[in-house]
Each structure stands twice: as structure tokens, then as C-alpha cells.
Amino acid sequence: MGTAWAPTPLPAEQRVPGYAVMPRRRARLSAAFPGERLIVPAGELKVRSNDEDYRFRPHSAYAWLTGLTGEDQVGHILVLEPSGPEGHEPVLYLRPRSPRGGPNRGSEFYRDRRYGEFWVGRRPDLAEASRLTGVRTEHLDDLEKLLTGPQPATRVLAGVDPALDAVTERPGSPALAAGDGRLASVLSELRLVKDSWEVEQLQLSVDHTVLGFQDVVRALPTALQHTRGERWIEGVFNLRARAEGNGTGYDTIAASGAHACVLHWIRNDGALDPNALLLLDAGVETDTLYTADITRTLPLSGTFSPVQRQAYELVLAAQDAGIAALRPGASFRDFHRAAMRVIAEGLADWGVLRIPAEQALQEDSGIFRRYTLCSTGHMLGLDVHDCAKARAETYLDGVLEEGQVLTVEPGLYLQPDDETLPAELRGLGIRIEDDLVITADGAHLMSGALPRTADGVESWMANLLS
Ligand code: GLY
Ligand code: MN
Ligand code: MN
């Protein structure tokens, strides 16, 4: 079996997407840790059951530094080795494609369900991977050697690859113990401002997500007939996500009626009530692993009832106020505060809030949070809740910068069993979520192809359903 295989080289000109931007990212990381070895793993497979694993997605930091985003990156490791005037030399430790000949006569190729080419498809060999990425490559088996003996000061992105953690935490590797989380936080912080290639990728994910939302509206007549219409909708959106990109960037939320009052309703096992609203929160992840995060709340009848419209328009006004607060130099929390002020004032006008809006807006007032549940947005990028390890002073307590991409997603969640509410408002859950990039003097709405106003939503639905 080890003989008579024709060569099947990858095209010589093939490069990872974003090839040109990767060196600059690595240089920025290098500058933050002079003289230290940095180890960033792609991650390991997770067993689903017996010999079945969950589909693999490399860790976002590894993808961000290498441009390698495929399922074939299982167990791979990027090392930034301190050296030379550049500060660090990047080296990728990879499992090369399954050998067909040699001492084991292709046993991995045929017999290894996890890594054999016959089972899971082709990986690049070491020379191909080096050409694809512009980074020197070594065999993964040689990593152990690197981590044995005298070590430079070393930092590992911990909690991603259990096998690597086991090696670097073993006794006798004191130099590997810089587990203070600084590598993780710096990696998050370097990703706060997107480069222009990333903004293009995010726009692509938004554009594909828009197609998915259109698909869902077209599928409503069928979904309404199904006993689990929410699942039907999830399936329709996810088909588009898988067809256009890598899949969904997070589990799709398809919530009819009061299910929308559960922030992360991903059970999606309900029927669709034709008189209720549908909250759809979904995003397509590109093959390069960037995701959109968009929510629309749609009247399943095609037309908002007066009370649905009243609640919808309050959330829309809050979103408008939030978007208007976006600009470089504004504090990150400003857009949340602006949106919440509109909602608090609206609830006070309706007589739902029985204390002044000002008092309800105090940080510690649970009185108001029962109707809004969470904050109004977050950074968006390779992860849906991007840059989550950034220190508060650079993100949550920081200021906005040109090139950051974020969501603005105020919501009103009026629980069906909330006795503070008049009966007609109970069970309404509304969120409007859009994706924006901060520009020199404000913000650009990336998801503007989907209507936001109540009238706009109704006519968009009518067009798609006609
Ligand atoms: N889909 C999760 C979120 O909106 O943050
Ligand atoms: Mn979001
Ligand atoms: Mn969302």
C-alpha cells in the first residue's frame, strides 16, 4: 500500500487568506513580550461520544496570528521564538499530511480515523504549510524536544490545548509557568481594532447573514405550519450559514412570542404563533472565522399590532440613541447609557416604571434591569463576544477607537409572568441588533441592508413573501 501514489501537490501560488496582514500582527505581539517565548495552540478535539468528535474550530488567537482556520489545524501550535532584530521568529509545529510510504507503510493514512488522510482529507505537508503561511514549519512531534531542557522565559496561551497544558505545567518546567493570563489579555487587546482586511471579512459575514434573514422570511409560510417552527427557522438560517461560510458564529436564537424573553433561547423547540413576534438572532461565520451578530424582531403576521409596534418603536429609539453615541473617543459605556435612558424614559411614560427614570438608571437598580436584562453591545470579530480577555481599562472602561467593530443591541424583555406589567405587554420580547464599525467621526452601519424601522420591516417582509 505504501507505493504507487502519484504526487498531488497544492498549487504553488496558494496562500492563506489575509497572508499579507499576518506578519504585522505577529510583530505587534512580539513587541509586547521581548525576549520571551510565546506559545499559542490551535486547540484539541473534544469527544462528542465514543469515536465521534465535535467539529473542530481553531482558537481565534491562533487563527488571527497564522491565517490558518481549517478543521485540519487540530493540535497545531504556533511558537514565537525570541530571536534576532525582529524580536521573535514564528515557527509552526504541525502534523503534516499522512505519509503513504516509509516505515509504517501508510498506516496513518488508512487506519487513523482522526488524522488519516483517507478518513478526514488532506493536510498540507510541512513545505506546503510554510509556503501557505510564510512561516517556518516543524513536525509536531518535535515540540516535545523544544520544551525539554533549559527554557527561555515562556508564556503559553493556557486552557486551549490540554495536552500542551500538561507538558508546560509538569514539574521541572518552572520557566514555563508565566500563567498570569497576560498573553491572553494582550492577544484580546491587539484584536480590539480591526485592520481593513478584517473589516472586509466582517462585512462579508454581515452580507451572508442578510441573505439568511431573507431566507427565513421566505420560509415563514412553511415554518408556521410546523409544530416546531422555531427549529425550522434555525435550520433555514443555518443552511445559508453553512453554504456561504463555515457555519453559524454562535447558536441561532429563533424565539417566538414569550420565548424571546429568554436572552439565549437556543432550544428553539416551539411552534410559531402567527399573532406573535419572532426574535431571530443569528450570524454567519466566514471561512476565515469572522462572524456577524444580528437580531431582527419580526411580526409573524407580517404586520405589527399596535402594542407590538409601540414596544418595537421604543427599542428602535433606544438603538438610534445608542448608535448616535458611537464615535472615537466616546467611552465604551456611553452607547449603553444612551440606549438605556431612552428605554427607562419610555417605561416611565407607559407607567410601567413607578420611579423616575433617573433613579431607575442608577447602576445598582434592579428595578429597571428586569426589563432589559443585559448590556447593549460588545466587540465583534473572530469571536461573537470578541476580545473578552481584554483588561477593563482597554475595553469596558476604555474609549472607542476608529476601526473597532461592535454590536448595538438594546432589548426589551417583558416576561409573561411579570406582575408589574399590564397584561397586554406581558410576553413581548424585542431586540434589534446591528453591527457597526467605528469611523473617523462616528460609525458605519454594516448591517444597514436589513430594515430596522417597523414600516421598513413590514414592507421588506411583504416583498419577500409576495
Ligand atoms: N447572539 C449573542 C449576542 O447577541 O450577544
Ligand atoms: Mn450580540
Ligand atoms: Mn446577537
Image (tube, rainbow, N blue to C red):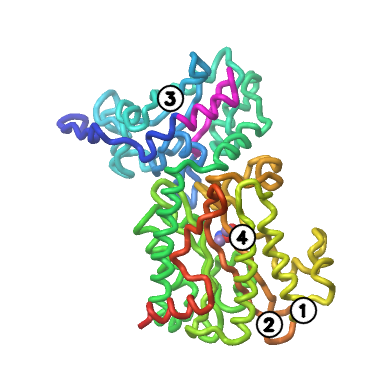
CA separation, marks 1 and 2? 10 Å
* Neighbour tally class for label 3: few under 14, some 14-19, many 20 plus, Cα within 10 Å: few
Residue 324 is labelled as 4
> x and y percent of residue 193 in the render?
55, 42
In terms of sequence position, does the residue under pointer 1 or pointer 3 come before the other?
Answer: 3
Relative to 203, does residue 15 appear above or below in the rendering?
A: above
Q: Which residue is pictured at 32% across the width and 35% down the height?
A: 15
> x and y percent of residue 245 in the render?
38, 54
Dividing the image into 4 quarters, which one contains the C terminus?
A: bottom left
Residue tagged 1: 352
In terms of sequence position, does the residue under pointer 1 or pointer 2 come before the other?
Answer: 1
In terms of sequence position, does the residue under pointer 2 or pointer 3 come before the other?
Answer: 3
- Look at the image and give the residue range highlighted in magenta: 24-43
Q: Is residue 423 left or right of residue 158?
A: right
Mark nearest the camera among 1 and 3 is 1
Q: Quadrant of ligand 2?
A: bottom right
* Neighbour tally class for label 1: few under 14, some 14-19, many 20 plus, Cα within 10 Å: some
Residue tagged 2: 425
Give yes or no for contact between labels 1 and 2 (Cβ–Cβ under 8 Å).
Answer: yes
Report the front residue among 383 and 457.
457
CA separation, marks 3 and 4? 53 Å
Q: Amino acid at mark 4?
A: Ala
Residue tagged 3: 141
Residue 23 occupies which quadrant of the picture?
Answer: top left
Relative to 370, does residue 289 appear above or below in the rendering?
A: above
Mark 1 lies on a secondary structure that is loop
